[in-house]
Amino acid sequence: LSRRVTVSDLLMGLTRALGGPVEIGVAVSGRDMASARLVGPLAWMLPVRVERPEDAARSLHDALAHAPGPGQLIRAFPGLSPSRAIGAQVSVTVIEQARRPTLTLDASALRPPAGCLVHVAARIVGDESLLTVWVSEALGQSPEALIHRLRPGPSAALITTLPVGFGPMWRQTQGDRPRAVGSAHTALGESLVIALPLGADELERPGLEAHTQAALALAAEAGAKAASLAGRLPTRLNFGAGLNSPLPLTTGHALTITAIVETTLQAMSRVELAPPLCVGVLGCGAIGLGALAALRRRVAVAEVQLCDRPEAAARLHRLAESLAAEGVRVSLRARDQLDAPLILAATSEGDVWPAEALPVGVVLIDDSFPPAVPVEAAWARMDRAGDVIVLGGGLLTTAQAPVLIPAPDLQAAAASILPADPLGLPGCQWEALVLAARPELPRITGPVTDAEASAYAEAARALGLVAAPLHLGSRRFPMD
């Protein structure tokens, strides 16, 4: 492998591949005859129980913090092999060497002790890793299948555009091609961020589909197991339905909807918003209406105010009839007529609602791209008058905060796309990671159905995803 592995990488991969929870014996230090049949220094084998893949790093840290001294585990059970002594059926060892010819081992030396189903040995030489995997027939999985799950590299990829105005400069310096600008290291694996050579204001420029196709090929070559689309790309590319993707592709809309709903519920717990709700929707596209439907599955909604462009009137009338048949009061309104105490904004145009024009007392969850309400102006009104609440609605996180690492040769460009201290990651970015972790989930290449949104929301909760702290832009909403 061309990349380094860590013990946490291996524990995460093994737990995911074996369907956890898993009791894993991790070789820590020393060597004696009790461990002669295993690769590496194994006299001290530490038991680490990993409940979920995303718990791997914390479980290892906790086990090391409470471990007995070297050799105590083995000496407490004389005559037993390390893994049998601690009751582990999976063993892991990692050896780091200087750059020199590696030791040649007879295949028989790679067999783990009796009772061990899986043994993984990782030898690190410089920036490269060599994985050796022994799998008992009793496990029912092939070594090749396990190696595929353990191979380090991105779990998923996010295809995105450059910020507004960046396209010409990018093409001049980087060429007219997509590039990986960095990655997010998360509890669910690594998410590679690939930028098209187009700004968010250049989606009418010829070549969008070809560039996206090239970006997907780049993601597959890097080893990603799934990909998703960011911003306005799904709607501009017909939800990706016409793309010939070399890897599972999803729009990112399902977990964007989840992020909006979870943020809304978090906000409701902080302010005086109790069901049955009156909800306004500004921007009645796939995201806005999907979020409304998902919110209605969680809390009672008695009244809905719908607002979109005039050309959407016929579609909104049909939706209003459908909601009214379910007992919901519905009205179609212009933007300035929206006065619901809770408004979900998901527009494809920015700055459509001046902060000073917001109705007093409103709680607005904004997942528009760009923001429907200018961020700085919204904070200015909240700081000065405190009579409205405007929150970003699209981020999710886990107990282990994501870490964003820019590509070494693209630090300046990456800084405009990857925030330095993320409160979370966009729902669309998490969606590919969740699909990689749960490949049985549907690949969404159209408007999100209720069943698809529910399936992704349930998988996200099971994997530990929650709403990011309440925020707007990069600034957190105050706790008091």
Image (cartoon, rainbow, N blue to C red):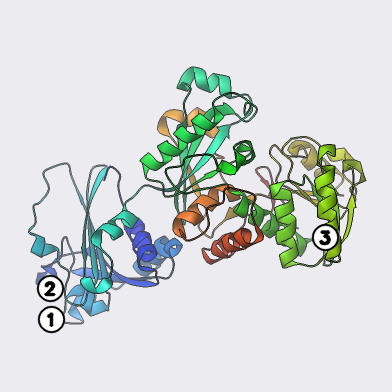
Q: How far apart are the alpha carbons under marks 1 and 2?
A: 7 Å
Q: Which residue is mark 2?
A: 34
Determine whether label 1 and label 2 are within 8 Å by CB: yes
Dot placed on the residue nearer the N-terminal end, 2 or 3? 2
- At label 3, the amino acid type is Leu
Dot placed on the residue nearer the N-terminal end, 1 or 3? 1
Report the disc number at residue 241: none
Q: Residue 347, relative to residue 262: is it above or below? A: above
For the point 82% across and 48% down, the residue is 316
Q: Nearer the viewer, mark 1 or mark 3?
A: 3
Q: Which residue is mark 3?
A: 323
The kind of secondary structure element at disc 1 is loop
Q: Nearer the viewer, mark 2 or mark 3?
A: 3
For the point 81% across and 42% down, the residue is 312
Q: How far apart are the alpha carbons under marks 2 and 3?
A: 70 Å
- At label 1, the amino acid type is Gly
Q: Is residue 51 visible?
A: yes
The quadrant where residue 291 appears: bottom right
Determine whether label 2 and label 3 are within 8 Å by CB: no
Where in the figure is residue 287, as x and y percent of width and height?
Answer: 69, 49
Where in the figure is residue 227, as x and y percent of width and height?
Answer: 49, 46
The kind of secondary structure element at disc 3 is helix
Dot placed on the residue nearer the N-terminal end, 1 or 2? 2
Report the disc number at residue 79: 1
Q: Is 434 placed left or right of 80 in the picture?
A: right
Q: Residue furthest top?
A: 172
Q: For the image shown, how many numbered marks are present on the structure?
A: 3
Label 3 environment density (alpha carbons within 10 Å; few <14, some 14–19, many ≥20): some
